Image (cartoon, rainbow, N blue to C red):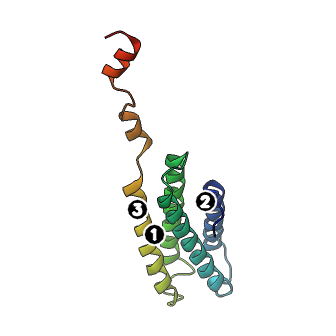
Amino acid sequence: MNKRINFEDTVFILNVRIRMIRDLLQLDTDTSLFINQTIVDMDFINSTLDILMEKFLANIKFLDRDIEADNLSDAEWQFGQIVNEVANKASPFSPAHFPEIQTWIEKFRKNSAKRQKLIDETYVSIGQAVLEPVVSNAELNGLLGSA
C-alpha cells in the first residue's frame, strides 16, 4: 500500500460506516443476521484507523496537519462511541446477547485508546499554534524600522 492516502475522504467513508452501524443499532432487525458483518465492519474501521494513524505519524510534513489531526481524532472518537454503544447492555449486539463480541470490544477499546493517546501527544491545537508568534515583537519592530 504505497499509494498516497487521502485522509479527508478516507475519514469521511469511515464515518459513514460508523453511522451505518449506529443506524443498525437503532433499527428493529434480526441481529443474528448482522452480527458477523458488524464485527467485520468494526474490525475494518479499527484496522483502517491504525493505518491512518501510522501514516499520520510517519509524515510530519502534511500541509493541513492540524485539520487532519482533528479529522482523525473525530473519527477515533466516533469509533469509540460506537464501540461503547455496541457494548451497552441495551444494545442488540451486547455481549449479553452475543458473548463472542466481548473479545472484539476489548480489542477495539484498547486500540482506540492507544490511537487517541498518540493523537493527543502529537497534536498541537490551532489555539496553541496561534499563541506562539512566528516573529517576536522586537524582530517585527526591527523589520518595520520602528525600534
Seen at 50% across and 83% down, the residue is 104
In this orientation, which residue lies closer to the viewer: 129 or 46? 129
Name the kind of residue labelled 2 in the image: Val
Task: Name above or below for residue 100 compared with residue 62.
Answer: below
Answer left or right for 100 relative to 128: right
Residue beneath label 3, please?
118
Name which of mark 1 and mark 3 comes first in the sequence.
Answer: 1
**Which disc number belongs to residue 112?**
1
Q: Which type of secondary structure does the marked residue at label 2 adopt?
A: helix
Amino acid at circle 1: Ser
- Check disc 3: other Cα within 10 Å, few if <14, some if 14-19, many if 20+: some
The local secondary structure at tag 1 comes to helix
Q: Identify the residue at horizontal 36%, vertical 35% (top origin).
A: 132
Q: Quadrant of the C terminus?
A: top left
The numbered mark, 1 or 2, whose residue comes first in the sequence reads 2
The label shown at residue 11 is 2
Query: Closer to the N terminus: mark 3 or mark 2?
Result: 2
User: Which quadrant does the N terminus fall into?
Assistant: bottom right
Q: Which of 34 and 128 is in front in this view?
A: 128
Please give the label number shown on residue 91. Answer: none
Question: How far across and down, in percent of the image, does residue 94 sit?
Answer: 51, 81
Which of the two marks, 3 or 2, is nearer to us in this view?
3
Which image quadrant is residue 33 in?
bottom right
